[in-house]
């Protein structure tokens, strides 16, 4: 599940960045996926920014799922807040 979310996040990241670059510089015309969807007609820039933000959220979600599967409970160092007994 984590890999699927990461792949979807990478796809949205590339789509969003390519859409923003295409809007300002008219490059990457072959990657203009969002401008070919009728819903986003004349709203390509906000859609590209939304895809970029959504991709970042998916990366955070994938990282959280990976940490939960590995058993990390939110602390980077277990017992790191206690003084060391010597």
Image: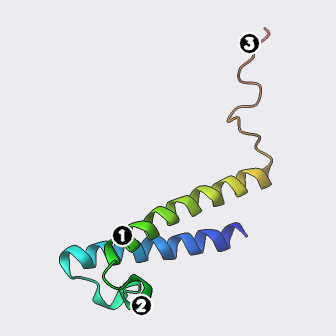
Q: CA distance from mark 1 to mark 3?
A: 50 Å
Q: Residue at x 30, y 72 (%)?
A: 20
Q: Residue at x 50, y 60 (%)?
A: 56
In this rendered view, identify the residue nearer to me: 12 or 84. 12
Could you tell me which secondary element the residue under label 1 belongs to? helix
Q: In this view, which residue lies farthest toward the left?
A: 25
Q: CA distance from mark 2 to mark 1?
A: 14 Å
Query: Which label number is shown at residue 46?
Result: 1
Q: Residue at x 64, y 70 (%)?
A: 5
Q: Is residue 35 visible?
A: yes
Comes first in the chain, label 2 or label 3: 2
Identify whether 57 is placed above or below 41: above
Could you tell me which secondary element the residue under label 3 belongs to? loop
Decide: few, some or many residues near mark 1? Use Cα within 10 Å; few <14, some 14-19, many ≥20: some
Q: Residue at x 34, y 78 (%)?
A: 44
Identify whether 64 is placed above or below 4: above
Q: Disc 1 vs disc 3: Cβ atoms closer than 8 Å?
A: no
Tag 2 residue: 38
In this rendered view, identify the residue nearer to me: 75 or 61. 61
Q: What x and y, as percent, mark residue 45?
A: 32, 72
In this rendered view, identify the residue nearer to me: 46 or 74. 46
Q: What x and y, as percent, mark residue 72?
A: 76, 44
In the rendered structure, the answer to whether residue 63 lies left or right of residue 27 reads right
Decide: few, some or many residues near mark 3? Use Cα within 10 Å; few <14, some 14-19, many ≥20: few
Name the mark nearer the viewer: 1 or 3. Answer: 1
Query: Which label number is shown at residue 32?
Result: none
Could you tell me which secondary element the residue under label 2 belongs to? helix
Q: What x and y, as percent, mark residue 17?
A: 36, 71
Q: In this view, which residue lies farthest toward the top?
A: 86
Query: Which label number is shown at residue 83?
Result: 3
């Amino acid at each position: 599940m984590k890999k699927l979310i990461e792949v979807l996040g990478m796809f949205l990241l590339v789509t969003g960045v390519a859409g923003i670059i295409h809007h300002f510089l008219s490059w990457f015309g072959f990657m203009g996926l969002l401008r070919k969807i009728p819903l986003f007609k004349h709203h390509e820039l906000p859609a590209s920014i939304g895809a970029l933000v959504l991709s970042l959220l998916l990366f955070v979600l994938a990282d959280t799922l990976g940490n939960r599967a590995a058993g990390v409970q939110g602390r980077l160092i277990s017992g790191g807040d206690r003084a060391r007994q010597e």
